[in-house]
Amino acid sequence: LGGRIALVDFAGQRYEAGASILHSVNRYASGLAAKHNLPLRRRLTKGITAVFYNGSSAEVTVGGLSSIIGLLLRFGFGTLIRMGTARDAIMAKFVNIYRLLDSGAAFEGVPEMLTAAAGGKRDLVDLTGIP
């Protein structure tokens, strides 16, 4: 899992410039960083970080106990539990990619890879907005 991927337009072409955040379950990125002795910062902020999309821009909340209480008051305990459960389900499906690749699977593109990782369902593809 990469995080926010930066795209750069150069000479009429669009190029991927890389990710600013890597999840610890990203086996390939973690392995590449270790192979080249690249230091990893585990966390840039202390406390809880929450990002909410309001339809036009992202709102970032960083804080400690007060942020947790604010999130509980705004969304309720059940919603936060469901968000965590949904995140864990997505991660479990994504990690399935490694099992498929280790068994020799190959894919024509990202939608096919994500569909295979999700057991033939398009739910991971739908999260990306890829048609």
Image (tube, rainbow, N blue to C red):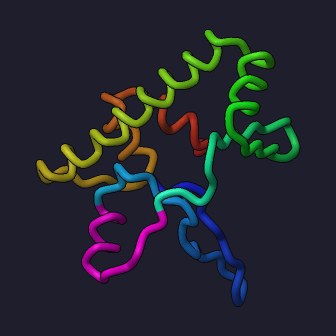
Q: Quadrant of residue 61?
A: top right
Who is closer to the viewer here, 112 or 25?
A: 25
Q: Residue furthest right?
A: 56
Identify which residue is drawn at 47% across, 59% down. Answer: 42
Residue 28 lies, with reference to residue 52, above or below; the image says below
Residue 24 lies, with reference to residue 129, above or below; the image says below
Identify which residue is drawn at 85% across, 47% down. Answer: 57
Q: Quadrant of residue 20?
A: bottom right
Who is closer to the viewer here, 13 or 94?
A: 94
Residue 123 lies, with reference to residue 42, above or below; the image says above
Task: State the quadrant of the C terminus.
Answer: top right
Q: Residue 103, percent across and down?
A: 11, 48
Identify which residue is drawn at 35% across, 34% down. Answer: 93
Q: Residue 53, percent across and down?
A: 78, 38
Who is closer to the viewer here, 111 or 64?
A: 64
Q: Which residues are magenta?
A: 28-41
User: For residue 31: magenta?
Assistant: yes
Q: Residue 82, percent across and down?
A: 56, 16
Residue 50 located left or right of residue 127? right
Q: Residue furthest left?
A: 103
Identify which residue is drawn at 73% across, 25% down. Answer: 71
Residue 76 lies, with reference to residue 130, above or below; the image says above
Query: For the image shown, how many numbered marks are present on the structure?
Result: 0
Q: Residue 8, percent across and down?
A: 68, 77
Q: Residue furthest bottom?
A: 11
User: For residue 127: magenta?
Assistant: no
